[in-house]
Amino acid sequence: MQRRRRTRAISSKLTEADLLKIERTGKPRTDRPKTLSLCEIHVTDKVFQWRNRGENIAESINHLNELVRVLKATKKPLDPIVVTPVGDRFFLLEGHHRLEAYHKVRWQKGVPVRYFVGTVSEAQHEALLLNIKDKLRLSRAEKFDAAFRLLKAGAKTYEQIKDVTTVSLRTINTMAKVLREHPKVLDETSWRRAWSAYQMQLVPNSDARHEDWQEEKAQKLAKQLIKNVGVGFVRDPDITARALEIIDENLPKALVYEWLEIAEDVLLEVVQEDNNEDAEKLLRALVYGRQPDRGGLTADEAEL
């Protein structure tokens, strides 16, 4: 029996500077086949990937598993992925989960593709737009990182960044303030880490110095939960909430304090759904009428 050839993702460590050099010196491919083999699709996470693989883990796994299930059940290709020609290669702009699913089932047929033709910078912008609209939404943290990345690039106005990422102008202004007052964060790709570094230089004795350690521990715990419990606990939040309460009756209250801004948003949504205008006014006053903190910026301004 002939053994099927194993396929693997063609992941590249090329940077934006590398692709810009290829763009200047090399001729782009002009052919536009309707399908490509897996080995013809190159992935450059440093350039065209706007998602953070450390965020939204459960939703990402569920999405990938569903794509794999569909491929196995139908034996038919998924919706076309989007690629762009740079030099003599095609690079993936949108469809990372679909491409991963093809590799998981060791897909041997052609992969349907659509093409975006433009400069590397234009392709980056298109990749963000496509991922914002994708079925698997960008997480809140990923949208903040995207806004921070666009702001550092300096090619778009604050209003354009807001329109693309849905991050508020207030937060974009906060990001600009951090960049002005603490230029060292230019090297950061994460808004969370940039904010932490800013806080640490603003208030040297603050707890911000521990945030990298906390993030590392949180990422490790998240992976342990996924490995040991699976992603089912995300589908039944009422059961998960009760399980946490059984572990420690004070844990739910502590978590609400950790997620205070999110809790405030949820309360506003509930009040708005009930069409209770008086309650909404009161709640907004309570939420946004707090005294400034976090080094002179309100919690609402930072949106962390």
Image (cartoon, rainbow, N blue to C red):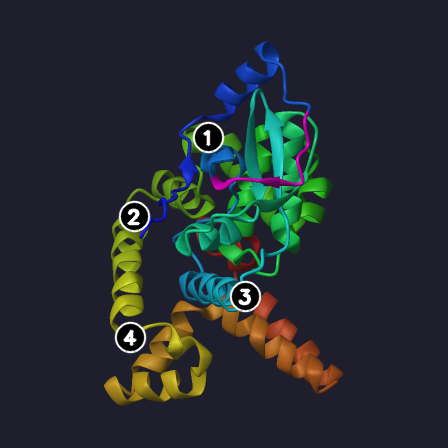
Residue with the most extreme top position: 25
Whole-angstrom CA distance, mark 2 to mark 1, is 17 Å
Query: Of discs 3 and 1, which sits in the foreground?
Result: 1
Comparing 150 with 262, the one in front is 150
What residue sits right under mark 3 in the picture?
Answer: 290
What residue sits right under mark 2 in the picture?
Answer: 212
- Above or below 189: residue 137: below
Query: Of discs 3 and 2, which sits in the foreground?
Result: 2
Residue at 52% across, 58% down: 139
Residue at 66% across, 46% down: 129
Mark 4 or 2 closer to N-term?
2
- Above or below 179: residue 243: below
**Contact check, label 1 and label 4, Cβ < 8 Å:** no
Q: Quadrant of residue 122?
A: top right
What residue sits right under mark 4 in the picture?
Answer: 229
Mark 3 or 2 closer to N-term?
2
Identify the secondary structure beneath mark 1: helix
Amino acid type, residue under disc 1 in the picture: Leu
What residue sits right under mark 1 in the picture?
Answer: 186
Amino acid type, residue under disc 4 in the picture: Val
Comparing 226 with 239, the one in front is 226
Whole-angstrom CA distance, mark 3 to mark 4, is 39 Å
Q: Confirm whether residue 244 shows in the render.
A: yes
Whole-angstrom CA distance, mark 1 to mark 4, is 38 Å
Tell me which segment is drawn in magenta: 31-38
- Would residue 92 be found to the left or right of residue 114 on screen? left
